[in-house]
Image (cartoon, rainbow, N blue to C red):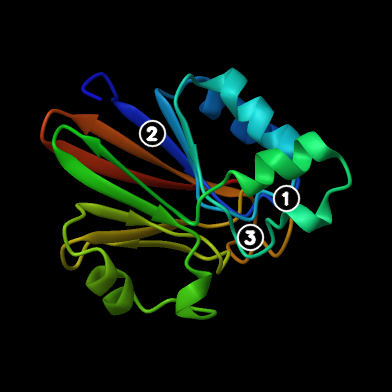
Amino acid sequence: MHDIRKITVISDTHGVIDDQIIPVLNDSDMIVHAGDIMSTSIIKKLKTYSRRVVAVAGNNDLPERYSDEEDKKIISELKKVEQFSINNELVTVEHGDRFGHHPPHADLRAAYPDSKLIIYGHTHNQVCDKSKSPWVVNPGAAGHTRNNDGGPCYMQILIDNDKWEIKSHCIK
């Protein structure tokens, strides 16, 4: 995936993506959703915003919560962990709930030591930890549920060859 230059990362939409984030999603080469999507319509919409969408299941993304068979199928096909490479660098995405309510970054790093970047959600708190390798980021909540950072949040990863820049955004 050498033509990926702008990745927008969201998580914890809980059925709602704030309208102010949609133009950003539309302007992305790739969208990553780190779980707790809670609506198959969000998955479908994300695929209209970008040709490349990576989404993982969160602790609230359970097929049994859906009555429609197509919705059950869409949710049941979400994996708990997704990995992809950009410019020969591994990126790992998981919701993070299996590491507890506030996943320790040391545990995430131990689980995915070969990654350049680990993206997780679950806490609804925006975090950008580049203190060690691999980097660990959480975009915060992009919906309207428990916006601990004050409003819907997202992150963008801007890639220019080997230079990776992470920008955090919260809508107040």
**How far separated are the C-alphas under marks 2 and 1?**
21 Å
> Circle 1 — which element?
loop
Is residue 172 in view? Answer: no
Give the camera-side residue of 126 and 47.
47
- Residue 105 visible in this rendered orientation of the protein: yes
Q: Please state the horizontal and vertical placement of residue 122, each as a whole percent of the image.
A: 56, 65
Mark 2 element type: strand
**Vertical arrangement, residue 127 with respect to residue 68, above or below:** below
How much space separates mark 3 and mark 2, taking CA atoms? 23 Å
Label placed on residue 38: 1
154 to the left or right of 144: left
Label drawn at residue 150: 3
Other-residue count near label 2 (Cα within 10 Å), few / some / many at <14 / 14–19 / ≥20:
many
Q: Position of residue 116 (x, y in %)?
A: 19, 52
Q: Is 134 rendered above or below residue 52?
A: below
Question: Hey, what amino acid is under mark 3?
Answer: Gly
Q: Residues within 10 Å of mark 3 (few under 14, many from 20)?
A: few
Separation (CA) of disc 3 from disc 1: 21 Å
